[in-house]
């Protein structure tokens, strides 16, 4: 029997192949060793990073040195509120990290952290034209996702729930619709709180899951990282296996003939 | 972080002192190049994970040593930090 977790099921985005379908954030861990242990437990091959004004030299070990060759970097434009700021941040990220991959985040409100669609679409077009591999964080809106894909986004990353909320996937039907219609991989980004929700994302048809807070702020981040890995793998297997249709009534699985005593 | 101006690198004596803005903070215009500005702030120009923009444009690392900073310039020095 072949292992159902076949290595012939890689995730491919923009020509880069991943064995792991879990992307992990690097922020908010109790300490850096816990972060490294969580990264290892998650099996992730791509981690996110922010681009910020430099702190006083020598304050802390460089994230780049810390991660080393453990994973690819997916820098983000977190906190940017205009396409202009996001494009400059992406260009700085490309120079700082030597990657043209960018998690494009353009928010319209610092409290809600909800995407500003108009600016997001504009920035996606500009960055694609500038040769970036753009993974936009976006609303769970199939029309917006389609526009982003048509502009050349390498993947679309709809939110399951507000960033850091841990509410899970608030609109699973729409995420499933996006997955069914998207010409590019769909990465569920934001909102995941626990492993079953990561599994659900994969069952709905997502190609991968990106999360941070659910692991970094868990009581035991390393164990939760392992749980997320298992959840993503289980959800992917279930998606590939094909779930049974839902029924309104019972359907016996044991034979109905030959019952004892009748 | 203040940047003490070094003798000889600053503005012409007697003229109105020129300033630049580094990471949103106004400071005297002292360093002649981007590389000199980094060194003056104890930032190793060879360190990985940092990038520099001058007046809103990214300057490739290879050009830092030869890129002059004009009075009134705006410089952003960034680094990769933990993020989600």
Image: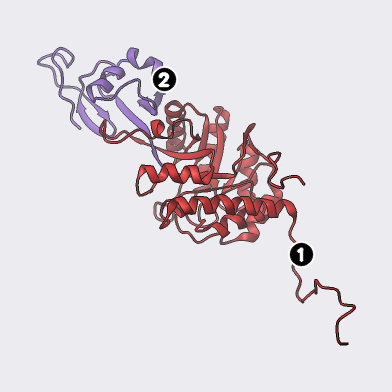
Chain colours: A red, B purple
Can residue A114 be seen?
Answer: no
Give whichever of A92, A99 is nearer the camera. A99
In percent of width and height, residue A7 lies at 68, 39
Q: Chain of mark 1?
A: A
Can residue A242 be seen?
Answer: yes
Q: Which quarter of the figure is the N terminus of chain B placed in?
A: top left
In percent of width and height, residue A120 lies at 52, 43
In percent of width and height, residue A190 lies at 51, 52
Q: Which quarter of the figure is the C terminus of chain B placed in?
A: top left
Instruction: Judge from the rendering whether residue B54 lies leftward or rightward of residue A18; answer left or right.
Output: left
In percent of width and height, residue A133 lies at 57, 33
> Dot 1 corresponds to which residue?
A245
Q: Secondary structure at mark 2?
A: loop
Q: Secondary structure at mark 1?
A: loop
Give whichever of B45, A171 is nearer the camera. B45
Instruction: State which quadrant residue A198 falls in.
Output: bottom right
> Dot 2 corresponds to which residue?
B60
Residue A138 tag number: none
């Amino acid at each position: 029997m072949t292992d159902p977790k076949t290595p012939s099921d890689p995730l491919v985005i923009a020509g880069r192949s991943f064995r792991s379908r879990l992307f992990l954030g690097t922020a908010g861990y109790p300490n850096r060793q816990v972060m490294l242990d969580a990264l290892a437990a998650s099996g992730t091959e791509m981690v996110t990073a922010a681009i910020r004004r430099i702190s006083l030299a020598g304050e802390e070990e460089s994230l780049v040195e810390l991660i080393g060759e453990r994973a690819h970097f997916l820098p983000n434009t977190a906190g940017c509120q205009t396409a202009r700021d996001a494009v400059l941040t992406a260009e700085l990220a490309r120079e700082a990290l030597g990657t043209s991959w960018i998690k494009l985040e353009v928010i319209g409100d610092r409290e809600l952290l909800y995407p500003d669609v108009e600016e997001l679409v504009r920035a996606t077009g500009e960055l694609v034209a500038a040769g970036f591999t753009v993974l936009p964080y976006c609303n769970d809106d199939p029309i917006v996702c389609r526009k982003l894909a048509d502009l050349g986004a390498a993947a679309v990353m709809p939110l399951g729930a507000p960033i850091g909320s841990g509410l899970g996937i608030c609109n699973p039907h729409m995420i499933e619709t996006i997955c069914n219609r998207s010409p590019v991989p769909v990465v569920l980004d934001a909102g995941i709180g626990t492993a079953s929700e990561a599994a659900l994302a994969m069952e709905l048809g997502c190609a991968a899951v990106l999360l941070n807070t659910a692991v970094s702020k868990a009581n035991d981040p390393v164990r939760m990282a392992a749980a997320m890995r298992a959840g993503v793998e289980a959800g992917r297997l279930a998606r590939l296996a094909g779930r049974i249709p839902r029924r309104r009534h019972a359907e016996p699985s044991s034979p109905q003939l030959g019952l004892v005593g009748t | 972080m203040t940047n003490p101006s070094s003798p000889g690198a600053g503005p012409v004596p007697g003229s109105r002192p020129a300033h630049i803005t580094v990471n949103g903070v106004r400071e005297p215009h002292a360093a002649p190049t981007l590389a000199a500005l980094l060194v003056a702030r104890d930032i190793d120009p060879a360190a990985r994970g940092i990038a520099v923009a001058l007046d809103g444009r990214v300057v490739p690392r290879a050009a830092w040593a030869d890129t002059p900073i004009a009075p009134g310039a705006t410089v952003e020095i960034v680094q990769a930090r933990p993020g989600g």
